[in-house]
Image (cartoon, rainbow, N blue to C red):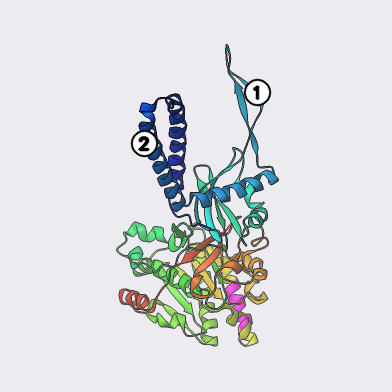
Amino acid sequence: MNQAYGNTKLARGLGWVCVYVDVGSLFPMLCTASSAGSASGIAMWLLVLALVNIGVGVYGYRQGLLFELLLERNFRRVCAGLGFTGTADKWKVGIGTPTRVKGGKTTYPLLREVRGTSASWVGMIRPFAGQTVADYTNEAEAFALAFDVPFVTCEAAGSGRIRMRCGPVQVPETYEYEPSLVSAPTAFDVRATLQAVPMARDINDQPWVMPIEGNHLLLIGRTGAGKSSWIYSLVFGLTAARQEGLVRLWALDPKRLELAYGMQLWDEYADTDEGMVELLENAVADMLERNKALQGKARKFTPSLETPLIVIIIDELAYLSAATDKKLQQRAQTAMRTILWLGRAAGYSLVSASQTPIKEVIAERDYYPTKIALGMEASLVDLVLGKGAHDEAGAYAEQIPLREAGAGCAYVMEEQSSKAVLVRAAWCSDDLIRTMLGDSPGV
């Protein structure tokens, strides 16, 4: 089927202009057809009209208008089957005031601005007044069957329109992290960053930000899904705050690979079983002391030079939860549970990443306000994001492409949200990490 990447709105407009011109020209030409003297002029005018019509037709085809019209016809059939139809009332005009009469033409929601191919396309729906995104989302399977695609999603697109995406899950484009995001911020910007760390981009290439102050983050995805993109995007986004002394970064690195590459980024670092557990227990002890110091003096924690926000990043949560010595497991789980339960109020944020959502890993899932599911099997999505995340909230993580095509893409469920958001974290290359290390203070 034809690709539609152009301006179908303009093509439709030109088509209607041609129709009006054609119809408006036929009557005078018929009236003068009996005059032999005007025959040559009529022939010339018909040739001009034919050339204009051919030109508009070619333009419309290249802009994808035929593709859009074929999809719209199928879209109307589905709407008719689902009952998404209305009636345009007729008006009877006579002496006095015009009156409305029954029995008008059947109307349908409009499908416009289609872009893509028959295998993967995006279009804009102009729904009837009173319809919602949920009305179309609930019928996604019917539209998918009619359009012969594996997947259909709908989302609000502004101005009362709904964006429909058909085909495989369409993910944001790959992009590299921009160091300019963290360069030369003002003191106010540094403080504000803790409530809006630039983390990713959505399908419309719009920035997606995440609070880290008062937050815990659970990050789960299969091997190669791009967990490091999320971790380093967070670390780079906090660079200025760390330089100002408002943030300290602690790293637990049982794999001794990803986090070790950026060694200078960490204020505290541990990569042995005993060392990692001790670091967690030290965090708990410091946290409890801070809670005691704040008791009766403040209702809300505010990062400062004396009490910076402590961000603890665990690169492989499953190892600490299940693969270490039993006694160390119990100590680690007790420490992490304490941080999850009490840490937000005292300025301690836990960022836990893992490849495997085993029972021990997700036992405290509900204490992570922000949960991120990268590529994984469909059966695991609800384990990571919560009940109903896959079928009701639309977190189809199994549809995320494998390897580089989907690396860094993830569905995010934030605290009190009912819909999963698909975003993509930036690719953080080795060269970028080395560049950022040059701008970061040593441990």
In the picture provided, is 395 more to the left or to the right than 31?
A: right
First-in-chain label (2 vs 1): 2
Q: Which mark is residue 44?
A: 2
Residues drawn in magenta? 329-337
Q: Nearer the viewer, mark 2 or mark 1?
A: 2
Q: Does dot 2 land on a helix, a strand or a loop?
A: helix
Q: Is residue 273 above or below residue 136?
A: below
Q: Quadrant of residue 335?
A: bottom right
- Which of 150/232 is in front? 150
| Residue situated furthest top in the rendering | 95
Q: Quadrant of residue 371?
A: bottom right
Q: Quadrant of residue 36?
A: top left
Residue, disc 1: 101
- Which of 76/209 is in front? 76
Q: Residue sitting at 40 percent across and 79 percent down? A: 262
Residue 303 colored in magenta in the image: no
Q: Residues within 10 Å of mark 2 (few under 14, many from 20)?
A: few
Where is the C terminus found, in terms of image quarters? Answer: bottom left
Q: Does dot 1 land on a helix, a strand or a loop?
A: strand
Dot 2 amino acid type: Met
Dot 1 amino acid type: Val
Q: Is residue 307 above or below residue 36?
A: below
